Every structure is written in structure tokens, then in C-alpha cells.
Amino acid sequence: MVMLPREQLLQGSRRPEALLPLIALADQALRTWEPVWSSFVAADLREELEQRLGALSELTISSAGGWPEAERRCLLLRRFDVADDSPALAGLIVSGNFLFDPADPDDMRRGLLAIGAEPGDLGDIWLRGDRGAQLVVSEAAAERLHGRTALVRTVEVQLERAALSALQLPAARSPRELSSVEASVRLDAVASAGFGLSRNRMVEQIRAGAVRINWQPVSSPSKELACGDRIRLEGRGELEILEIQPTKRDRWRLRMIRR
């Protein structure tokens, strides 16, 4: 069987080293007629793979992340006529007192990686106030990490395996279309209006690294946006710019959708 044209599929990719193993899994699924699950991958990588392999009539790509709105997901690569199955996923509860040393999801991830978890073991992570966090992990990782301790920032945490059904999932968001008139199309101005935060608070979030545009980290509040840009704010979802039109008073009318 002819292998997929890897050089052609990787051309122009921002992350060829991460995309190549997924293309190899697609090759495997096509060659063996057996469905193949990947480890957890980031949303930008998943979207890129779907775009690059989506034209293949023989291949079907689906995904699962342990809850409906998951950003990090395991990919299922299979021939279109091969039956579906489910990945082996579980929950993990991270318990500790973060009242005096607040942590974010990246801090939680670093703490777990430091005790031997692999990046592909870890799905979405969400905070539970100052008590710790919950996350989706591979079943194998849940078994390895259950009962262990880890250090997240300065806080010692306890790790406990949990069924996915026992997790307290983040609140689901319904898509909502918004409109706003702004003096500029700067990131801080548009995101402030779209996410309902003050301009100063939005600037703090951007400089803290909590904002991505089209999945890429951004640290400049003055970055100008264009139609089609997708702004993601940690813990508050995604804002997509649907339309930007100039007004008669040298301002900008924006139509957006928040998910």
C-alpha cells in the first residue's frame, strides 16, 4: 500500500515535528484496517491535522476529550468503514490548599509532568477554586498517579483517580453573537468588549499569557485583529471575529460570536 505523502502534508506546517507522528498513525490505520487512538493533542494541532487529511476519502478522523467541550483531545484515526470505539480515559483530582499561593492550569500541568506524567497523558485541566483542580487523563496515567503526591508551585497536592462521571465539569457555554463599536481593533479593546472585562483587567490577562489568537500565545495588548481571528481567554472560552466594518466617525463596528 502506498504511504501518505508526508513531505507534502507537512509543507507549511508550524509544528511539523508534532504533526508527523499523527500522520504516521493515519498511515497505520489505513494499512492495518485497525482503528488507532492518539494520545492527547492540543486543539491547534487537531485542527491542522483535520485540514490536511480531511480530503482523504478512505480516512475518518474523530476525537474525544472526556467531556463535550474538551480542548485537548485524543484522535481516532480509522478507515471510514471500520467500527468506532472509545478511548480509555479517566479523571484525576488534584487536592491542595492554594489559598495563599494561587495556581493556574499550566502550574498544575508542570507539577504532574515533574513526577513523570507524559504530555500526551494529560487532557483538559480546570481549577476548583483554591482547593486544587480536576482533569481528564489516560486510564494508564490515572492508575500510575493515583495516591501519589506532587508539588504545584509551593503547594503539596494529593492525586486521586476518579471516574469521568464523578468530575465536576466546567459550566457549558452556549454560543452568543455580539456586536460592539470600538475606537480601534486592538486586542485589548475588542477582547474587553467580547469577554465583558474591564480594559485594564484584559491587559493584565494578555500580559500574563492567558490569551491566544488562533491558538498562538500573544503578549501585546496593542496587537491588531482581523476578520476571522479567534481569541481564546483561559477559563472564559473563545471569541471569533465575524465582521469588521468602519463607521462614519472613524470607529469600527464589530460582529463577534462568543463560545
Image (spheres, grey):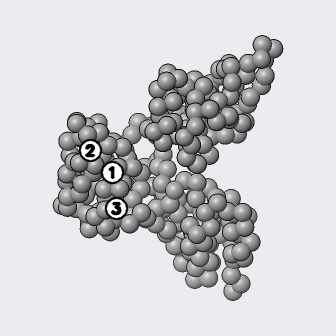
Q: Position of residue 119 (x, y in %)?
A: 42, 63
N-terminal-most mark, 3 or 1: 1
Q: Report whether residue 86 is seen.
A: no
Check disc 2 and report the residue beneath it: 132
Q: Report whether residue 244 is seen.
A: yes
Check disc 1 and report the residue beneath it: 108
Please tell me which residue is depicted at 64% across the width and 60% down the height of the picture: 14
Q: Quadrant of the C terminus?
A: top right
Name the foreground residue: 197 vs 89. Answer: 197
Q: Position of residue 12 (x, y in %)?
A: 72, 63
Please tell me which residue is depicted at 56% across the width and 43% down the height of the picture: 218
Q: Secondary structure at mark 1?
A: helix
* Three-letter amino acid code at the position of disc 1: Met
Please tell me which residue is depicted at 34% across the width and 65% down the height of the picture: 117
Q: Quadrant of the N terminus?
A: bottom right
Name the foreground residue: 75 vs 192. Answer: 192
Q: Distance from label 3 to label 1 (Cα)?
A: 9 Å
Kindly report which numbered mark, 2 or 1, lies closer to the viewer in this rendering.
Answer: 1
Please tell me which residue is depicted at 41% across the width and 56% down the height of the picture: 123
Query: Does 157 appear above or below 5?
Result: above
N-terminal-most mark, 2 or 3: 3
